[in-house]
Image (cartoon, rainbow, N blue to C red):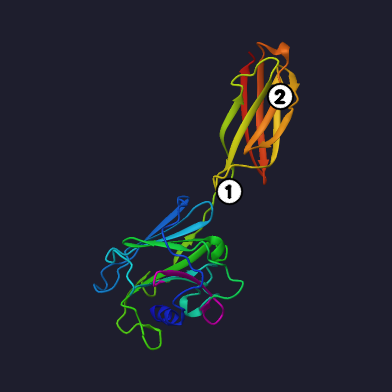
Amino acid sequence: MVFAIAVAVVALPTVASGALSGPASTTAITANSTTYQDSSGENAAAPDITTLTVSNNDAGVISFKIDIPNRAQLTQDMLILVFVDTDANPQTGDPESLGADYVIQVFGGEAGLFRWDGTDFTRRAGDPPATSLIFSYQNGITITITAAELGNTKRFGFAAIVIGGVTIDPVTNDLDFANAVSDIAPAAGAGFYQYEVRITPPSLVTKRLTPTPAKPTAGRAFTLRLVATRSDTGAAVQNGRVTCVGRLGNARLRAQVQRVVAGAATCTWNIPVAARGKTFRGSVGVTFEGLKATQGYASKVR
């Protein structure tokens, strides 16, 4: 496997067009996480991978965190590669890299995503744009990318290689590995680490229900406003189908307003003058893209 990856490294371009680099994604990666341990101290002169943690959140953002404690900073001579078998099938992808379908490359301050085209890892028209690919470095590298840009992967195998001592030939402008030292995880012959992307189906979360006025009042309009957000993105629902239910005792009140207004599912009822002292019971519901949120309310009419 070391030989196969070394061949792939030489074949890869050094910079990907449009690649992004910079601080780690602000999206929290908490939904699913797996940690892998690598042997350490194989070569004191080489970058030493110790721990790898892969995680994903419910938005499908995948994070690769590779700890390299003996390399506190990312230096210009370091080349980092993550080979990903996105369909978990070694019979597809690069046959010399255990079926890897994609390679993420970090070198010279740039991150690039390359896809196996049957002959080489390249970027072609129609490939995922890799706009989500970013990285940060502190005693190791953290790379984030969406599952959508890795072939909508649900389960994948992966390996990482970190190489130090890489230079650029001033004549040919090619990468020079004459004095390179490296570490690979998992160890040669161990295959790929395996990871399953797990995403909790999104739902609508009730954030608050606001009555106006504070209590239903006889002879006045009464409004309930429900703010609901998506569990996966935190975005407030801005449209959808609103359901309003209002009752005074056994009598049902018809809502005068029943729609989303300024990011809130809004229901307005006219409270009869004779309703003072009775109990108003209502609920507001909103349905958006098949997701539903409902909140009930009860109070005596003043």
Q: Position of residue 285 (x, y in %)?
A: 66, 34
Q: Position of residue 212 (x, y in %)?
A: 62, 24
Looking at the image, residue 64 sits to the left or right of residue 151; the answer is left
Mark 2 or mark 1, which is nearer the start of the sequence? Answer: 1
Taking depth in this image into account, of 93 and 171 the one nearest to the observer is 171
Quarter where residue 208 is shown: top right
Looking at the image, residue 45 sits to the left or right of residue 87; the answer is left
Quarter where residue 215 is shown: top right
Q: CA distance from mark 1 to mark 2?
A: 34 Å
Amino acid type of the residue that numbered disc 1 sits on in the rendered structure: Pro
Does the magenta portion include 110?
A: yes
By secondary structure, the bulk of the magenta-drawn segment is best described as: strand
Residue 253 appears in the picture as rendered: yes
Task: Provide the residue span drawn in magenta.
Answer: 107-122
Name above or below for residue 134 compared with residue 206.
below
Crowding near pointer 1: few (<14 within 10 Å), some, many (20+)? few
Amino acid type of the residue that numbered disc 2 sits on in the rendered structure: Trp
Q: Quadrant of the C terminus?
A: top right
